[in-house]
């Protein structure tokens, strides 16, 4: 029979063991920090009833949705009635509306699952990827202090992920909306284009951006408008200066004032959370998508890898689940797209093969001592050391080669001589050194070197 | 606009927060033990190229497969080219064949992911459910000692899951195949029917089963054959007696002898692994599916819940990935169907709401002290206590009610008086007691009571 070529669908993620271990450690780090900040786990089914999932979207978005059908249903010519989640926000909205009465509010959940998009296959596009989200969802209201907790979580997560220096940028969209209102720029598309140009201030001069804002066809601000925009949101500096700048503007617009007030509260709370200002700044030019978010918005950049764009984003929204319930459910949340981040870090050489999750390999030096090796393995496992026992009677060199390839650091060796002395040898595969250890002290010894 | 009723597809699993936490702890327990025994993580994409996934199966199995298609592909009238995994074995086989050169053998992976089956919706049938698998896969050969490791893992996992008394049953299919060969019972369907009747020996008398084996239409053993079958595999007793019984039979069949030899080795190694015989027995009547497994087979039963059937099963197979590679890849593995087990345990009242993963709630007694609460929260989190800060200025009673509903055990309270004294109060929501604790000792105090 002809062999079938084993392969995975384009745009999906699959890793070799030691990369998988590294990825798993990143997932664990994110989860540990999410739990540390008092978020609880949620998992939703990979597919939803199509009508429920797609109630809102249409057009382009819907083209990227994967529909699911069993063979039976296809044969009977049914239309697919199941669709795979394309993010974690819609399933969470559905969940909160569905179980509203049973949930305790504020509902603080983390959700770390894969999402699916029927993208055209190309480099950097994923059809299946992890999102790691947290959200705090209130009933009727949710104080702005919760907005300050998000950067505290981002700070803890990215510090522990150890992927180099990073900076959390945040802003309040009410400031932007208020400014545009005051300047009479009402068209959302035009607003987006303006913000995109302001964002170029770190590459272009003020004069150049001023020119672009006036001469670009779909923007066409007046000279006065363009100057106002740059005067207001072209400002960059420490948070105290930025807040002083906003207050100095004295713009007579309710939304703008509300935004400045909220931003001031967030900055104050962030200091109480102990997040050092070296790792965050107010960035008046960021807005995220102009529809969904209504207040604070976040973006996070890796200082050494600006081309990655934001690696953790989110914001405050007015009402999570208006499609499913009449209750008002305001919330705030962030999301880490871990699959994309992981591959980008891998390409940048930051993410490497991890040591194995297996901490010790009990080798088989003498097949006659097999039951001893099994007992040593059982003792180490009982003591909490992740232990593999090599059960094939291969030559020692082959067993060490295996430990090396698998990334297992400590190899335990015992021949007849060692057994007679009540000892074992422990070979450190990284350092290349070897130690004789009393057998009854082996577990404690290994635990101390593993740390 | 009319509201959409939020709902999940039939046959999928979704849990309220405190059940989700319980479920998550079970997943964590299984994973921790799998890693303790030296298994490394593997994750594969939820869908595979349809031709690769369905190379083997057909007919009934294929009807239960979910196919996946993007809207674009449906509109263009394409046949679905993606299909969702229906188990973890086929994706693992594909993975091992695909990355054969890069993997270190024996390849020991755990995989804990959801699988999908397009089942007719009915009670107890799941369209999406977790499987938690381990396998050891060798290249060319794999010593039988690995077969003894599986019950050691099952013992560790189920002991720590704390779901009541359990017993691991195992057998070697070569014994059964050899017996049938020797008796001239060659038809696989007939063999299966015979084994199903022998399995009834715990409910029916020997005479009754003997009668059934002779008179049931598709079985129709001769009186002599029926007696032989019961003489050979109707035996039940301690492992030493069972092995003695098998040796006493002296059946002159190579396969049978090989099976007895392997079974003897497994029993010996299992003792060296320290698994007490109170938790396992040789059960000569179990066979698992007659196609896939070729040697040792396992089933695990909860003593108090026999109606659940086996909650952890598996066995030894000759060649994992013959469809994808010419290499011979023998292996042995087990699988826990956690979704099914969880719901069954829930119905039996064994699984209950867990305490929250949030260990402490910093309440907001006086809004003027908000920054203090944020600092206390930050201190607790830095010390490793999973902490939520209640940021809405609600009445204390409402905040305690929230802690109670969410299952958060310790509520931290600080008003102006406590602050002046450098103290906080800690309310134990379960015990109903309250303690005054020095603020600088709070983290250590909580860590000691949390344990």
Image (spheres, coloured by chain):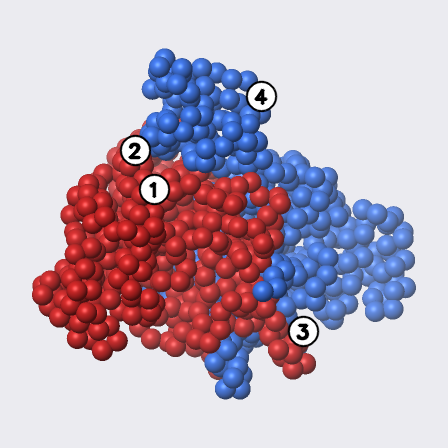
Chain colours: A blue, B red
The local secondary structure at tag 4 comes to loop
For label 3, the residue is: A60
Residue at the spot 58% in from the left edge and 68% down from the top edge: B50
Q: Nearer the viewer, mark 3 or mark 4?
A: 4
Q: Nearer the viewer, mark 3 or mark 2?
A: 2
The local secondary structure at tag 2 comes to helix
Instruction: Specify the farthest residue to the bottom.
Output: A77
For label 1, the residue is: B148
Q: Position of residue B260 (x, y in %)?
A: 29, 46
Quadrant of the rendering where the N terminus of chain A is positioned: bottom right
Q: Is residue B323 visible?
A: yes
Rounded to the nearest whole Å, what is the CA distance between mark 1 and mark 2? 10 Å
Rounded to the nearest whole Å, what is the CA distance between mark 3 and mark 4? 55 Å
Could you tell me if the residues under marks 1 and 2 are in contact, i.e. CB atoms within 8 Å?
yes
For label 4, the residue is: A431
Q: Is residue A23 visible?
A: no
The local secondary structure at tag 3 comes to helix
Could you tell me if the residues under marks 3 and 1 are in contact, i.e. CB atoms within 8 Å?
no
Residue A24 located left or right of residue A222: left
Q: Is residue A245 above or below residue A74?
A: above
Q: Residues within 10 Å of mark 1 (few under 14, many from 20)?
A: many
Residue A396 located left or right of residue B17: right
Residue at the spot 61% in from the left edge and 64% down from the top edge: A2
- When asked about the image quadrant of residue B229, the answer is bottom left
């Amino acid at each position: 029979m002809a062999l079938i070529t084993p392969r995975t669908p384009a745009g999906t993620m699959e890793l070799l063991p030691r990369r998988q271990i590294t990825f798993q450690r990143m997932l664990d780090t994110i989860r540990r920090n999410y739990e540390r900040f008092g978020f609880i786990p949620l998992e939703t089914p990979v597919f939803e009833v199509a009508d429920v999932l797609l109630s809102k979207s249409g057009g382009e978005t819907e083209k990227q949705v994967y529909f699911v059908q069993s063979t039976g249903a296809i044969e009977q010519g049914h239309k697919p009635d199941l669709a795979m989640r394309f993010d974690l926000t819609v399933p969470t909205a559905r969940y909160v509306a569905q179980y509203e009465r049973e949930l305790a509010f504020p509902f603080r959940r983390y959700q770390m699952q894969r999402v699916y998009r029927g993208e055209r296959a190309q480099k950097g596009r994923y059809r299946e990827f992890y999102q790691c989200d947290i959200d705090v969802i209130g009933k009727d209201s949710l104080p702005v202090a919760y907005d300050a907790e998000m950067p505290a979580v981002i700070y803890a997560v990215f510090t522990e992920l150890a992927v180099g220096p990073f900076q959390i940028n945040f802003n309040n969209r009410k400031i932007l909306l208020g400014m545009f209102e005051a300047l009479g720029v009402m068209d959302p598309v035009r607003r987006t284009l303006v913000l995109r140009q302001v964002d170029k201030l770190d590459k272009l001069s003020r004069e150049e951006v001023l020119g672009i804002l006036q001469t670009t066809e779909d923007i066409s601000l007046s000279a006065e408008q363009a100057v106002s925009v740059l005067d207001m949101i072209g400002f960059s500096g420490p948070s105290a200066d930025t807040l002083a700048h906003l207050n100095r503007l004295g713009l007579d617009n309710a939304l703008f004032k509300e935004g400045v007030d909220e931003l001031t509260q967030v900055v104050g709370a962030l200091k109480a959370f102990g997040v050092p200002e070296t790792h965050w700044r107010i960035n008046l030019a960021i807005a995220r998508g102009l529809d969904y978010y209504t207040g604070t918005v976040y973006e996070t950049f890796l200082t050494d890898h600006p081309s990655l764009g934001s690696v953790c984003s989110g914001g405050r929204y007015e009402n999570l689940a208006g499609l499913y319930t009449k209750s008002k459910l305001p919330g705030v949340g962030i999301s880490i797209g871990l699959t994309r981040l992981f591959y980008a870090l891998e390409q940048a050489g930051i993410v490497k093969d991890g040591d194995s999750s297996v901490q010790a390999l009990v080798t088989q030096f003498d097949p006659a001592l097999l039951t001893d090796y099994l007992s040593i393995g059982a003792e180490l496992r009982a003591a909490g050391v992740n232990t593999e026992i090599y059960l094939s009677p291969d030559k020692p060199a082959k067993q060490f080669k295996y430990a090396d390839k698998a990334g297992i650091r400590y190899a335990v060796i015992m021949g007849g001589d060692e057994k007679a002395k009540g000892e074992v040898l422990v070979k450190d595969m990284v350092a290349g050194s070897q130690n004789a250890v009393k057998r009854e002290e082996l577990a404690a010894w290994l635990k101390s070197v593993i740390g």
